Amino acid sequence: MEQHGKLTVLDPHGQPSGIFGRRLDAQSKPGDILDPVAQPSGDLKPLSMAPRTGSLDGKTVYLVETGFAGSLEFMQELQDWFSEQMPSVKTVVRHKRGTMFTDDPELWMEMKSRGAHAAILGVGG
């Protein structure tokens, strides 16, 4: 999520865990996210989460693998689970360019233009 050029990072429970002053691009090194120089200070306001989609029946869910070891295999297993357990849900597996910390505006635009209702980003393991 973005507010005034700042990004909010959500923890595993979906709660905002911090607001960071910049995003990384595909040429950034993973350690660049730790650079304190680019972090904002002062009055930071929390952002709210997007509303829940409700039922996934008949909806499209993007399964985004981040290039982390095992994430593609995990997303493929998740796709298999959806096809067996929730066959009305359309799943699309995509690779996000860069690292798990970098932005991929082209992928987000694809998801928006093709009517994605939800996305699951996975790092594998």
Image (cartoon, rainbow, N blue to C red):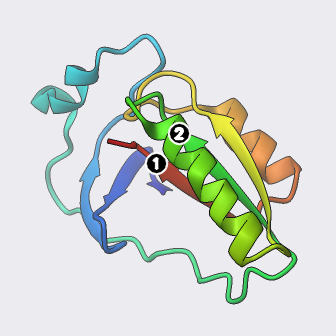
Residue at left offset 36%, top offset 15%: 28
Q: Residue extending furthest top?
A: 27
Q: Residue extending furthest front?
A: 84
92 to the left or right of 40: right
Which residue is tagged 1?
122
Residue at left offset 19%, top offset 22%: 31
Q: Could you say which quadrant of the image residue 23 lies in?
A: top left
Q: Is residue 45 visible?
A: no
Disc 1 crowd rating (10 Å Cα; few below 14, some 14-19, many 20+) is some
Amino acid on which disc 1 is placed: Gly
Is the residue 39 above or below the residue 111 in the image?
Answer: above
In the picture, the disc for residue 89 is none
Q: Could you say which quadrant of the image residue 101 lies in?
A: top left
Residue 35 at x, y percent in the picture:
15, 26
Q: Secondary structure at mark 1?
A: strand
Q: Is residue 77 visible?
A: yes
Is the residue 93 above or below the residue 23 in the image?
Answer: below
Q: How many marks?
A: 2
Which residue is tagged 2?
73
87 to the left or right of 43: right
Amino acid on which disc 2 is placed: Glu
Residue at left offset 29%, top offset 15%: 29
Q: CA distance from mark 1 to mark 2?
A: 10 Å
Residue at left offset 69%, top offset 36%: 107
Q: Quadrant of the C terminus?
A: top left
